[in-house]
Amino acid sequence: MSKVTRKIGLSLGADICWPGAYEEIVKRLDLELPIDGDRVRFEVDRVTVEPFDLRQPCSYDVVIDRLTHWFHTSREWIKKAVIMDGLYVLNNPWSLQANEKHTTYAAMMHLGLPVPDTWMVPPKDYTPTADLKPTLNRYARLFDLEKVGGQLGYPMFMKPYDGGAWVGVSRIEGPEQLTKAYDNSGTRLMHLQKAVDPFDIFVRGIGIGPQVHIAKYDPAAPLHARYEVAFNYLNDEEASVIRDMTLTINAFFGWEFNSCEALRKDGVFYPIDFANACPDFQVTSLHWHFPWLVKNMVRWSLFCAATKRPMRRTLDWEPFYAVQKQDLPFRERLAAYAKIARGRFEEERFEEFCATHLQQLDEVAFEFFGSARAHELVRLKVEALFPAHEVARFTEHYWGLLQFWRKTERDRIDAIGKPAPQTEARHARPVGKSS
Ligand SMILES: Nc1ncnc2c1ncn2[C@@H]1O[C@H](COP(=O)(O)OP(=O)(O)O)[C@@H](O)[C@H]1O
Ligand SMILES: [Mg+2]
């Protein structure tokens, strides 16, 4: 048996808390796994930014990337390493670069998901370019914005076709407001989308590989309280719909870490924003949910690194289209898409890997999230975001929520293996399958 080391790289920008937690947990796990005749160990370090020869080899097996959507040097290094050196990266950089929110709406509408009606309107203003005038003079048709508004219906949302972080999003109640919002939209290419209104539940399905963690969300709350700590707010079927939607979207676009927002109205979940392939991973937003996501990332990335799972470099939409053509009832159709997704994420093999090799993760994470290092990471993140006079208060606020997670986690771990009653475990778990 030979000893091999699998190297995992973290490609980071401003992130502080999750990489620190991830590194510490992998270190504390101190794994040496018997895989295919080898003893496999893991090393984690951070990817640096520097000149590179396209022909130079890449020392990483897996990279968890948080930069591709805006930092080109890292993105292009990753692309060359995937093509030339067999690097496994999450998420697929080509898909991230090419597939804006608009494409995701189109794709999921086509697959039959209940995305609210959405229009695209040409921008109000343009940055001048050589061919702009003849192009617009010849081909841009004057249009009546209020007529489009009337066809779509109010209330609606105007939002950038490639949006993120709520920038440029406005809720529109009527024609006057629509004209005003459009006049102020400048050069941004916008969607108009029918509001899901009123909705009674807002959830985010946060997928990492085949795992989906579901969080209840309140968009009207202050930033630190938008992700809610809530239990049993979805029934099993609803949770399963959110999981299946999230996995379908993620497998379709080659995103192994993505968050899918859906709003429930009259019992139907409408997905409204699911091109979030660099989702929020900060303890200051996720608090109680944070350990779930760190653990899910540890599991999935170790699985990918340990098994040398090949990265799917191209997307291959055909199997999804083949299901779409069958014209099945919605739930059966969604289940059929999710089956493709689970196959692509090797759900069974992954679960077997976790059961065989990562049994101790629950206890290791439980200990870690009560440690001085975890407290320090929370403080460092809070210091980076909050004014000095709020640092102590908010550090303790988030720390308190992590300790509450430990309490619910203790109950959950203790309930595993006990034949009955299972109800305690259910109450202690977030809705959705997270482990
Ligand atoms: N169709 C819609 N119905 C109801 N609320 C919406 C709709 N679209 C957007 N919103 C609200 O606006 C917020 C921002 O829109 P979203 O599409 O998520 O943009 P971003 O990509 O900037 O997060 C959502 O979190 C939600 O609160
Ligand atoms: Mg959003």
Image (spheres, rainbow, N blue to C red):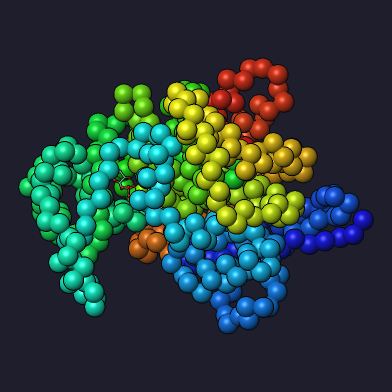
- Image point 35% across, 41% down: which residue? 272
Question: Ligand 1 sits in which quadrant?
Answer: top left
Is 146 situated left or right of 347 in this image?
left
Residue projecting furthest to the right = 1
- Image point 17% across, 60% down: which residue? 140
- Image point 63% across, 66% down: which residue? 83
Is 175 situated left or right of 376 in this image?
left
Q: Position of residue 84 (x, y in %)?
A: 66, 69
Q: Position of residue 44 (x, y in %)?
A: 68, 63
Is 112 situated left or right of 50 in this image?
left
- Image quadrant holding the C terminus, namely top right
Residue projecting furthest to the front = 138
- Looking at the image, which is closer to me, 346 or 355? 346
Residue projecting furthest to the top = 420
| Quarter of image, res 406 | top right
- Image quadrant holding the N terminus, namely bottom right
Q: Position of residue 428 (x, y in %)?
A: 55, 29
- Looking at the image, which is closer to me, 313 or 166? 313
Say how many tags the image has.
0
Query: Does the rendering let one see residue 301?
Result: yes
